[in-house]
């Protein structure tokens, strides 16, 4: 059998933000067993697990890593803008680099339920690779699941560590009989704590923005007073746990109905006007707290207004929150950058050099140029290097006018919006796209 499979573990997603409860219930051995069952004719060549391994919460997993030959990849925190988990970015970069440098690797297993990896799956498909997702069913994004070639579901409570219910203690005066054997907890059984929330906010599918806001705010109002969550709320509820709670109480959850693709932003919108808020406990560590009694040092995040999805503002928000982010500047700045690219025709440029050249040619701020180039990645042939800064960029031969740059950008925006809008029963509106990435200088007002 060929060693043609790479497995990438998004540990933070699997353990709900380093929650001890989830770490204790995670069996990497069981995950590997199920992957091998799904790919019986393949052998694993590469295994990497991304997390802040200095966290004491992950100590229990280190022995399994060693025994299973999984390489731990240390990720200390978050990227410079605090908007995206750094382990996700490292995982994506490594997967794409492997696709270039190890053509014999044909199968890519992404152990995560994060919908942001849908873009990675599509890119790997372009390279002729097979993508298999792997996660708990309740924590899996439908968008990611749908673009994978196959999916491996892992149990909510691993089969190797069943948790039987504790039998009641018999009265001291009665003879003690051997308790009957307890049945293992079913792998798909939801947490009892979610059920306590659901008593006040019964599960309800939400097909509109108004329904989603009403139901999510009912859930958050109950969370604020629920005795079972009091201790966890005082320390902050991890966003991965919040997502599972909302998926339990809102079957088929589509947070993009708020007008935000990024779950964290959607939570800031859904929590508006409730006793619950989002706060940054430490740099990059966002959790839910009660507004009253917010811990000292925790930075309160502002409530966000709901956005109309089919609007320029809504599309810009969804694109900025996509993975990778597609944040475009206003039309005049965009057109100046689009004109600069074919004028300078970069060839074999490293990223810092490319940014500097386009900044000089367009007279736009470096930050604006950088975010636009990331969005316009499909305009370039790219050769990976040891780091992302060492990649070599060459403008494609057919990208020879500003109009062609804008055409490619519209295609990128269209594809990324489709990923978000299709689950909502919507398709990208070409008129709105034309306002974001104009077809001509006249539309841009330049």
Image: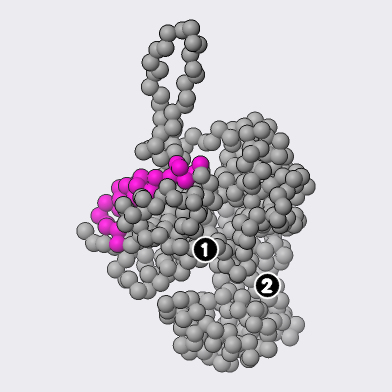
**Disc assigned to residue 436:** 2
Query: Please, what secondary structure does the residue beneath circle 2 have?
Result: helix
In which quadrant will I find the N terminus?
bottom left
Q: Would you say 44 lies left or right of 338 here? A: left
Q: Which residue is located at x 70 percent, y 49 percent?
A: 295
Quarter of the image with the C terminus is: bottom right
Q: Which residue is mark 1?
A: 76
**As drawn, is 221 to the left or to the right of 357?**
right
Q: Examine the rendered structure and indicate whether residue 98 appears above or below residue 366.
A: above
* Rendering coords of residue 201 (x, y %): 67, 35
Measured Cα–Cα span from mark 2 to mark 1: 36 Å
State the image coordinates of residue 259 (x, y, percent, origin top left).
Answer: 68, 57
Mark 1 residue element: loop
Is 331 placed left or right of 73 in the picture? right
Residue drawn 61% across the image and 60% down it: 284
Q: Which range is magenta?
A: 21-45
Question: Residue 373: x and y, percent?
Answer: 58, 79
Badge 1 density bin: few <14, some 14–19, many ≥20, Cα 10 Å: few
Badge 2 density bin: few <14, some 14–19, many ≥20, Cα 10 Å:
many
Asked if the magenta segment contains residue 27, the reply would be yes
């Amino acid at each position: 059998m060929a060693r043609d499979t790479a497995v990438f573990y998004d540990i933070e997603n699997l353990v709900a933000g380093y929650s001890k409860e989830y770490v204790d219930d995670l069996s990497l051995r069981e995950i590997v067993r199920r992957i091998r069952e799904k790919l019986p004719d393949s052998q694993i060549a590469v295994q990497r697990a991304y997390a802040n391994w200095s966290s004491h919460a992950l100590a229990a997993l280190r022995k399994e890593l060693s025994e299973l030959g999984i390489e731990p990849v240390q990720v200390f925190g978050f990227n410079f803008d605090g908007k995206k988990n750094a382990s996700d970015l490292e995982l994506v970069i490594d997967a794409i680099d492997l696709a270039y440098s190890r053509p014999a690797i044909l199968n890519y297993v992404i152990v995560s339920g994060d919908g942001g990896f849908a873009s990675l799956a599509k890119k790997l498909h372009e390279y002729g690779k097979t993508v298999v997702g792997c996660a708990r069913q309740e924590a899996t994004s439908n968008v990611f699941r749908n673009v994978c070639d196959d999916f491996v579901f892992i149990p909510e409570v691993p089969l190797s560590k069943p948790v039987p219910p504790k039998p009641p203690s018999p009265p001291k005066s009665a003879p003690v009989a051997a308790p009957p054997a307890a049945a293992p907890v079913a792998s798909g059984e939801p947490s009892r704590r979610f059920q306590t929330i659901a008593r006040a906010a019964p599960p309800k599918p939400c097909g509109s923005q108004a329904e989603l806001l009403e139901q999510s705010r009912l859930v958050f109002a109950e969370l604020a007073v629920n005795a079972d969550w009091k201790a966890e709320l005082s320390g902050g509820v991890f966003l991965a746990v919040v997502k599972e709670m909302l998926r339990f109480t809102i079957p088929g959850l589509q947070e993009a109905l708020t007008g935000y693709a990024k779950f964290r932003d959607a939570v800031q919108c859904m929590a508006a006007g409730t006793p619950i808020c989002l706060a940054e406990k430490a740099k990059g560590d966002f959790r839910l707290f009660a507004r009253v009694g917010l811990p000292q040092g925790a930075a309160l995040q502002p409530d966000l207004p709901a956005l109309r999805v089919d609007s320029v503002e809504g599309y810009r928000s969804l694109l900025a929150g996509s993975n990778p982010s597609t944040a475009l500047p206003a039309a005049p700045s965009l057109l100046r950058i689009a004109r600069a690219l074919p004028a300078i025709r970069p060839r074999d440029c490293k990223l810092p050099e490319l940014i500097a050249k386009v900044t000089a040619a367009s007279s736009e701020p470096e930050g604006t140029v950088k975010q636009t180039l990331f969005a316009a990645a499909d305009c370039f042939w790219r050769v990976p290097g040891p780091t992302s800064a060492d990649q070599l960029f060459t403008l494609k031969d057919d990208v020879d006018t500003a109009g062609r740059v804008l055409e490619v950008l519209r295609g990128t925006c269209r594809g990324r919006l489709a990923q978000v809008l299709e689950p909502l029963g919507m398709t990208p509106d070409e008129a709105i796209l034309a306002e974001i990435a104009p077809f001509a200088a006249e539309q841009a007002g330049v």
